[in-house]
Amino acid sequence: MTATAPAPRPAAAASPPPPARPRRPRRGGAGGAALTVLTWAIALVFVSPALWMVLTAFKTEGAAQTDPPTFFFQPTLEQITGVLSADFLPYLGNSLMATLASTALVLVLGTPAAYALSIRPVKRTKDVLFFFISTKMLPVVAVVVPLYVAAAEVSMIDNIWTLVVLYTAMNLPIAVWMMRSFFLEVPSGVIEAARLEGASLPRVLWSVMLPIMAPGVAATALICMIFSWNEFFFAVNLTASQAATLPVYLVGFITSEGLYWAQLAAAATVASLPIVIVGWIAQRQLVRGLSMGAVK
Amino acid sequence: MPRSEHRAGADEKEDRLPTKKRPLRPLAALGALGTAAALLGGCAGAGAIASGGDGTTLVVAIVSNPQMEDAISLQEDFTQEYPNIDVRFVSLPENEARAKITTSVATGGGEFDAVMVSNYETRQWAEFGWLTNLQPYIEESGYDDGDFLGPIRESLSYQGDMYSVPFYGESSFLVYRKDLFEEAGLEMPADPTWQEIADLAAKLDDPESGTAGICLRGLPGWGEVMAPFNSVLHTFGGRWYDRRWNAQLTSPEFREAAEFYVNLVQEHGQPGAAASGFGGCLTHYSQGRAAMWYDATAMVSTVEDPDSSTVVGQNGYAPAPVAETDYGGWLYTWSLGIPASSEHKDAAWKFVSWMTDKEYTKLVAEEYGWERVPPGARASTFETPEYQEVASAYSGVMRQSIARANPQHPTNRATPYSGINFLAIPEFQDLGTRVSQQLSAAIAGRITVEEALRQSQRYAQSVGDSYKEEQ
């Protein structure tokens, strides 16, 4: 989505204007055209797997297997209706629950941590930051059996809250790192001014800093949502019939003894729609948020 | 959100007046989303739990193959008979299902009341006490286990008792394109040898028209390339271990089988063979891009399905090719067992017996036709005239291949293990996968067969040593 968004503007208006940089003149003529073609070609390469997925979703199983793939065919809704008519809704509900609840928790827990590590650095801030990110270095496959046994011990297998807790833990380090860089963007003068006016710490956080950081928070939230929405490994291992999420539903279409490309493509298209919609709505904030660090 | 330009300007003013109350739109939106999530998730969870009613809820883990999906769509028949038993399926692809079921059953996780296992797991798990002995249930309910084909029943039994009951059974055979054979003036021998198949593949290989001489799996995985390769190995007289658990992967017989397999697939196999497993070969063959294919008999449900295949009705079937021994096929079955940790064993048996009974076969035939019935487990299915009619091209070869399989004696020399397409030891999932990676690399041409076998021998010997210690 971001590939087609307008060019990023300078971030928060409250931050000092970036140092004047001579603007490169727009290229015209052959060079400009070549650049446009190249940009489109690269964009097409990136979007082609998704395009193939959407096209295949409207084919029959037989048509999906042709080599080379066909681009002109009689479209059918058979696969899409097949996907929606099965038990789609409980999986969708579980995915929404796991994604949104874990993202909300990440923001609630991650914001104060990022504040402490940027505006009011604690002792050994760097070590703390490294400790946060080091939790991402252990391959998840190494912890899945202990997690399974622990969850079974407290009867939390196949419970959506297990996934909420795990996704929160999984995304928290990334969120802290991201939001810390956004906090660093906030000019210290603004904070000092607010404190001089007598604003309490929560007030400064809520009414001064967060509005400036809103695009950054939106970007962080969206990234956490994407990671949680697509997470498969924990979901497949720690759920069964009650708490399974969409990726688990999706993988059920894969079979080792038959053709399944069209069905799987239809399920994948339907499963990716919510996140595409959220990304599209938040597109402008995202571009601003993700380029916040870049204009420093 | 889209009005961020305006908001940024507003923020500037408010930075000077931080005490002024103002709404925080991004956060408010997030809060609303969180509430929505809690509501939706809560509803979904409640909905999923509540539908069990007053009765028993069974959770059944199955492998997402087409015939199992048919069972899911026919479950209404079961719930009509047992209105108080609600069945929920967890349907996953083979690898994920196997990993999940193994974890759950081994740790007593207890989330499943019935699980789909194969003849690889059943005996081992019965021995470990992880599965419920089904024999008392069979005898009490008058379930017809005498109807199962001998090798299938035997492969799911431990000390004479069945610990899982078969949903369908399979062996391996060779499918070939009769029209291409006719065009080339060739004939398929009634009981082909591997050398004859290699010669035929050389003659039929036609890269210009995009038709490979033969399709053989090359994808790493103990259930992928190792299945056909092991059956080739055993008919070549090779074995993984001698009776004292000395690894035999660099023995002349093993080397001969490996070189034969790798050369055949490299010279006359499908393009990109090192990346094609059962699914890849199925696509190749059913789209007319291979003249022959040696694989599981379960292929027929797709190869002979007009919706998925372009070669329906053009296929001949021959028994698994042989070399030194007089039988070259394998034996595999997907079956249903009840974990020892299940709290609803009686209800689980009702479901397991429903899904594997003769009546279920008739139900599938009525609803979807005889070509969709799960084959290869019950003699009565093969003897039904309607099934014989729709499956005339392959049912005879299939039954013969299953009936002749002898996993207790996979080759012509003694082995300390049983199993043809796999070794029925717990270590084989790991060992088989490691060796398959070597074999696949040899097929891709990245290493030589010699190098692959030397490395594989080391893997196999370390497993063999652990058994030597036990002896």
Image: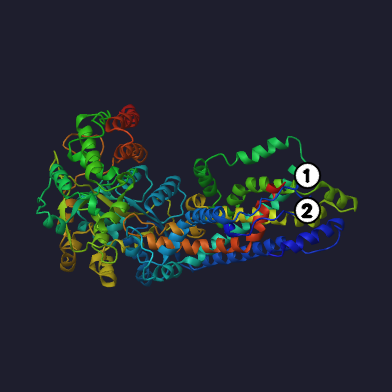
* Relative image position of residue B136 (x, y in whole percent): 30, 55
Identify the chain of the residue marked 1, using the numbered disc in the image. A
State the CA–CA distance, disc 2 to disc 1.
11 Å
Q: Left or right: where does residue B175 sit relative to residue A93?
A: left
Give above or below for B370 relative to B423.
below
Image quadrant occupied by the N terminus of chain A: bottom right
Q: Position of residue A33 (x, y in %)?
A: 54, 56
Q: Residues within 10 Å of mark 2 (few under 14, many from 20)?
A: many
Residue at 83 percent across and 56 percent down: it is B15
Pick whichever, A219 or B465, lies toward us: A219
Q: Secondary structure at mark 1?
A: loop
Q: How many marks?
A: 2
The residue indicated by pointer 1 is A119
Q: Which tag, 2 or 1, sits closer to the chain's start? A: 1
Q: Residue at x 47, y 58 (%)?
A: A50
Q: Contact (CB < 8 A) between labels 2 and 1?
A: yes
User: Label 1 amino acid?
Assistant: Ile
Circle on res. A209: 2
* Labels 2 and 1 positioned on one and the same chain: yes
